[in-house]
Structure formats: C-alpha cells, structure tokens
Image (cartoon, rainbow, N blue to C red):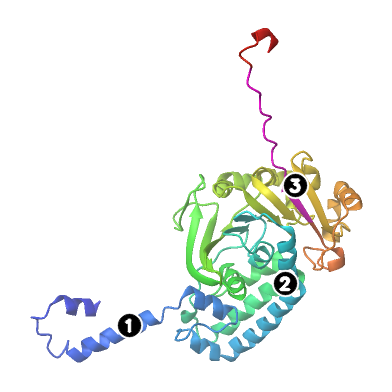
C-alpha cells in the first residue's frame, strides 16, 4: 500500500528522507518476497504426499523437518505396497477388460477415493466423486504454526491407512481425522492421490451447485446442497483433465434438491463405478441415484455393494462376473443376492488377481462389469413399387 502511494506521486515528487530510494527498493524486494512465498497447488500436493516440491519452492524448508522426512518414508512404503498388491494389477486388468471407456467416470459414495478411480479408469478426462465428507479449505502450508506440520501429516496418514491396506475408507475414522486442524477435509487427500499418481495439479477452485445443476464459484452465502472442489490436473501424457468432488447427500430427499444429478447429466454418457457403498443402492431411500446410474451409464463397474444385479434388465445389459462371490461381510449379512449367486454359478466368472471392496482378500473379492446393450437399428422399410396397384403393394 505504501509502495503504491509512493509510486503514484510520480517522478517530480521529492520523497525526502521518509521515502528514500533505498526504502522504495526495500519495499519492492519485500513485495517480491511476499509473492514468492505463495506456494503452488502442485508443490502443496507434493509435500503432503511426501514428495519433494519444485526447485525454489517456499515449501522446501518443510522437507527438512524430521516429521516430513518420516512421513515421506512412510508414504513411499505404503504407496509402493499398494501398487505392488493392487494398483499395477488393477491397471493391467482394466486395460484388458474395459475396452471402450467413456471420457467421464461417475463414482458415487466414493469419498475421496481417487486412487481406485484412477486405477480402474486411467484414461478418463473427467472424474466426479461424491460423499458426505467435507471438502475443507485449499491448504496453505506456509501458514502452519510451529509444530503444526507433523500433526497435519499424521492425520493424513491415519485417514489413508485403511484405503491403502483394505481398499476402502472407514467412514467413522475419516470424520474425526478430516474435520480438525489447519489441513482438513478431503482436499488434502485428493492432493496426495494426484501427486502419488504422477499428476501435476494445475488449478484448484472451490465451487458449488445450484438446484438446477449449474456450477458456480463457492460462496458461503449461497445455500447449496452440493459444495465441492474442481481440480485441473495433467499427467505425463499432457492433456488437462478434471477431478470434481462434491459433498452431498445422495439419499432421495437430498439428491433431488441438490442439483447434483442434473450436473452429472450434463456430462453425457459415463462409466460408473461403485465400490464399498454400504449397499445403499439396494435401498429404496437411494432409488433416485440407482435409477440415474441405470439410465445414464454406458458401463457400470461395481462390487456387490452397488446396484442389485436384479435391477439390470437382461434386454438392456450384459453382465460379466469376475472373482468370487461369497456374500456380504457380517455387518451387511442381510444383503445376500440370490441372483448374483446364480450368475456366479453359471456365468463362468473369470479370476482377478487383486482384492477389492469389503471382501478385500483376493480369493473373496468380486467385480461385476455391466455393459449397456446398444439398441438395434430400425429395420429398413423397402420403398413401394409405383408400378403395382396400391392394394397389392
């Protein structure tokens, strides 16, 4: 502010001792230093992920902290083990099985589980994730208090421990781990997954939806049933892609008012992914989401906690089972599906060499690929022969 006032006086103004040339030069350097202290979104993502930031980043001093160095070693081990046990195998399975992927992936009941969305659908242009977990604020690691870095990193490690070892988040654990502290919400988790997947975060914008499904910049004054975040990122292959996460109630009474499904409908036909969804798509209270996915999906990839197999009309869908169906875990023992059991008994299920979902052991995991049957073209009508009387045509 002082600098702008000084410069606005023009060259003919004598600044005197108070506004000497040395002071002006010092103010210019101070402004430049302040601007340099703004860390990029990508550097923030990398530091949270236990990866070094770019050269000259204001976050570089944080990497000399013993807490960060411990965090980096822990994540190197955890993500390396995930890739060995699941990630690389899922990528190979997806490449061999999902031959005509859509540009958009809808992953409802996901929480911040980008790591599995990207593993199964690595070529998507747009990912839409949703859950009840809060987005949080865009993290600014330059403003962490002394000693605050270790606490924030430890919270992220605890929040990710179950998805990296079991393939799904434990919701009750995330609620306590992601609501407190300077670095909170699902946004830091999304940053970690993006950085560890080799992506470069280019732009992060807090957004929300109105009831008509129109996206707008987030404003706390707006009443919204779907606040969210839009992250623009790129991989080594170059194209810019988009990741959305929305905090929204997917039950009928919430999703019909939030505009979330209307927004998803604007993205065109999509591939849908359902995993560890607490069997909510089985419930009448979530029929709006279930019906939307059946209407708008070109393909549905899911475990048995997704859409009940009986809801896939045989004249509209082909079903390919993979793995083994041994029924729900004890917590969901009432969600046994006789038709899914029959499909596995007669459908010649192909094996999978990774674990996924609540039955996360490889020998117990199941996946279903439901592919929409393309409508048959209308049979061509032969033109009438004008040489014949109308009654004989």
Q: Nearer the viewer, mark 3 or mark 1?
A: 1
Is label 2 in a helix, a strand or a loop?
Answer: helix
- Using the image as rendered, state which of residue 316 and residue 80 is in the foreground: 316
Q: Quadrant of the N terminus?
A: bottom left
**Dot 3, how many residues are within 10 Å of its Cα: few (below 14), some (14-19), or many (20+)?**
few
On the rendered structure, is 275 left or right of 366?
Answer: left
Q: Which residue is mark 3?
A: 283
Query: Magenta span covers which residues?
Result: 368-384
Q: Which residue is mark 1?
A: 32
- Using the image as rendered, state which of residue 261 and residue 55 is in the foreground: 55
Q: Residue at x 55, y 84 (%)?
A: 52
**Residue 324 visible in the snapshot:** yes
Q: Please tell me whether the stretch drawn in magenta is mainly helix, strand or loop.
A: loop
Identify the mark at residue 88; answer none if there is no mark. 2
Tell me which label, 2 or 1, sits earlier in the chain.
1
Q: Is residue 362 above or below residue 144?
A: above
Question: How far from the left and from the top, in percent, is residue 41?
Answer: 49, 73
Q: Is residue 178 above or below residue 302?
A: below
Question: How far from the left and from the top, in percent, is residue 37?
Answer: 41, 82
Is label 1 in a helix, a strand or a loop?
Answer: helix
Magenta highlight on residue 319: no
Q: Quadrant of residue 349?
A: bottom right
């Amino acid at each position: 502010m002082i600098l702008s006032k000084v410069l606005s006086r023009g060259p003919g103004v004598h600044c005197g001792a108070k506004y000497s040339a040395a002071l002006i030069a010092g103010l210019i350097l101070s402004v430049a230093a302040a601007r340099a202290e703004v860390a990029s979104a990508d550097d923030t993502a990398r530091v949270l992920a236990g990866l070094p930031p770019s050269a000259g980043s204001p976050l570089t001093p944080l990497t000399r902290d013993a807490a960060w160095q411990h965090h980096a070693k822990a994540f190197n081990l955890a993500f390396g083990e995930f890739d060995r046990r699941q990630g690389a195998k899922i990528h190979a399975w997806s490449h061999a099985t999902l031959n005509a992927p859509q540009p958009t992936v809808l992953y409802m009941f996901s929480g911040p589980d980008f790591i599995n969305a990207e593993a199964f659908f690595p070529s998507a242009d747009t990912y839409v994730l949703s859950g009840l977990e809060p987005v949080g604020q865009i993290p600014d690691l330059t403003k962490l208090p002394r000693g605050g870095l270790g606490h924030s990193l430890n919270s992220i490690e605890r929040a990710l421990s179950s998805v990296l070892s079991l393939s799904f988040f434990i919701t009750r654990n995330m609620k306590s781990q992601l609501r407190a502290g300077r670095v909170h919400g699902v946004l830091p988790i999304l940053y970690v997954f993006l950085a560890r997947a080799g992506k470069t975060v280019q732009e992060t914008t807090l957004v929300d939806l109105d009831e008509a499904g129109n996206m707008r910049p987030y404003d706390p004054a707006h009443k919204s049933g779907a606040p969210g975040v839009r992250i623009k990122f790129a991989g080594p292959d170059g194209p810019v892609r988009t990741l959305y996460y929305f905090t929204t109630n997917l039950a009928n009474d919430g999703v019909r008012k939030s505009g979330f499904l209307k927004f998803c409908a604007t993205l065109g036909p999509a591939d849908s992914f359902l995993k560890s969804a607490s069997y909510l798509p089985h419930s009448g209270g979530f029929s709006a989401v279930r019906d939307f996915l059946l209407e708008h999906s070109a393909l549905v990839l899911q475990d048995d906690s997704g859409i009940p197999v009986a809801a896939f009309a045989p004249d509209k869908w082909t079903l390919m089972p993979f793995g083994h169906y041994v029924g729900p875990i004890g917590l969901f023992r009432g969600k046994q599906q006789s038709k899914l059991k029959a499909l596995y008994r007669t459908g010649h299920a192909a094996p999978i060499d990774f674990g996924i979902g609540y039955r996360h052991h490889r020998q117990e995991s199941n996946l279903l690929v439901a592919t929409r049957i393309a409508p048959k073209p209308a049979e061509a009508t032969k033109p009438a022969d004008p040489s014949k009387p109308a009654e004989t045509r």
